[in-house]
Image (cartoon, rainbow, N blue to C red):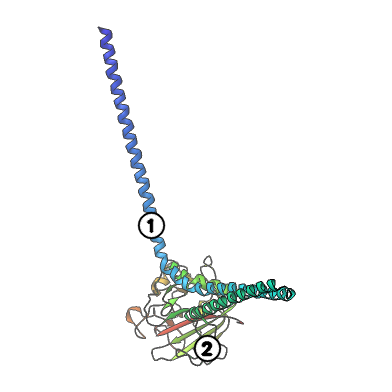
Amino acid sequence: MQYFLKLSFIIVIYGAIVTLCQSSCIQRNKIRSLRQIESHHENTTTNISDCREYESRLPNQAFLNNLYKSETLKDTIEAKELEISKLNATISKLEFERLQSINGCKECNELVVQIQMQKEKIGQLQLEVEMLKFELLNWKTKLSFNVNKEDTFFVPNDKRVVGAHWTTIQHRIDGTVDFRQDWKSYRDGFGILDADFFLGLENIHQWTISQPHELLILLKDWNNIQRHAHYDHFSIGSELQKYKLLTLGNYSGNAGDALTPNLYANFSTYDRDNDNLSALRCDEWRSSGWWYHTCVSDSNLNGHYCASPYCSKHLGRGIVWNTAWHNWQYSLKSVQMLIRQINH
């Protein structure tokens, strides 16, 4: 009797242990599932964050797509012209073979057909090249500005700066675009090509470091008096060098030289303080990105756009070109910065 009681007790205990183990396994499975859900949620959150970062880059990428479109078109034109050259060589070869086999009527006819097909292909390629050249001209027109006697914006009385092949790197005309932008925006470029825009520090660096460039600055005040400043060797450093203003060369013009004092200055924005004053944030006070040594700067062409020469809320923080022409309190009506390869 005692044996059966013990056996029953053991069976009960065993059953309880099995139930406890099953419950523990179920609990572990639930914890594992919860951890998988949590991991999936973290991955989803990361993906969403990455997507938002990508979306934030889209405006700048679209801006750069416009910039590089002309280069892509140029490469396509060169490839098609190379193909045309090869086809012409093929036609010459076929013509030679036709002359060699002039006595064989069948071979002669086949060569004539091949030559005609090659000529038709060349005609189609030439048409495509002309269309691409026309498209390339349109894109170059958007990115470039020709300084000539017919120009309605400004006619500099200086033979050294009159001509073509100028590329606009900065333009201010009506305050449509806010120039209080972060480091990333100034690096990549922002704005509207046909209105207010900044080409981008990285683009300017790549262009001016690969080939010597000159800089032309066109300025207009609120009396519509137009002046210019020209520097014969302009270049800026890389991002690692904080896009330092490396060279300007010699100044000429009638607007006065307000940029040379900024030579060797680093570029600063409201979120990247690269000036020489640790206690002050010149970029924050000036409300824009520019090459600052200190907060006292004779030039700031990216400053706040004012609707009049003097704006009380932003006095001294407008589009400044501090020379004998206008002082540091005066904000210009419009400005354009252009570069051109030397010995173009």
Amino acid found under the numbered disc labelled 2: Gly
Q: Position of residue 254 (x, y in %)?
A: 50, 90
Q: Position of residue 303 (x, y in %)?
A: 41, 77
Amino acid found under the numbered disc labelled 1: Ser
Residue toward you, 334 or 256: 334
Query: In the rendered image, which quarter contains the N terminus?
Result: top left
Helix, strand or loop for disc 1: helix
Q: How many marks do you count on the picture? A: 2
Please name the residue that numbered disc 2 is placed on.
253
The disc, 1 or 2, on the residue closer to the chain's N-terminal end is 1
Residue toward you, 132 or 98: 98
Residue toward you, 188 or 63: 63
On the rendered structure, is 37 left or right of 259?
left
Query: In the rendered image, which quarter contains the C terminus?
Result: bottom right
Q: Quadrant of residue 343?
A: bottom right
Q: Position of residue 73 (x, y in %)?
A: 53, 74
Please name the residue that numbered disc 1 is placed on.
49
Helix, strand or loop for disc 2: strand
Looking at the rendered image, the disc whose residue lies closer to the viewer, 1 or 2, is 1
Q: Position of residue 6 (x, y in %)?
A: 28, 12
Residue 16 is marked as none
Residue toward you, 237 or 196: 196
Q: Quadrant of residue 250?
A: bottom right
The answer to whether one can see residue 239 in this image is yes
Q: CA distance from mark 1 to mark 2?
A: 50 Å
Residue at point 43%, 82% (across, down): 320
For label 2, the crowd category at 10 Å Cα-Cα, with few meaning under 14, some 14 to 19 and many 20 or more, is some
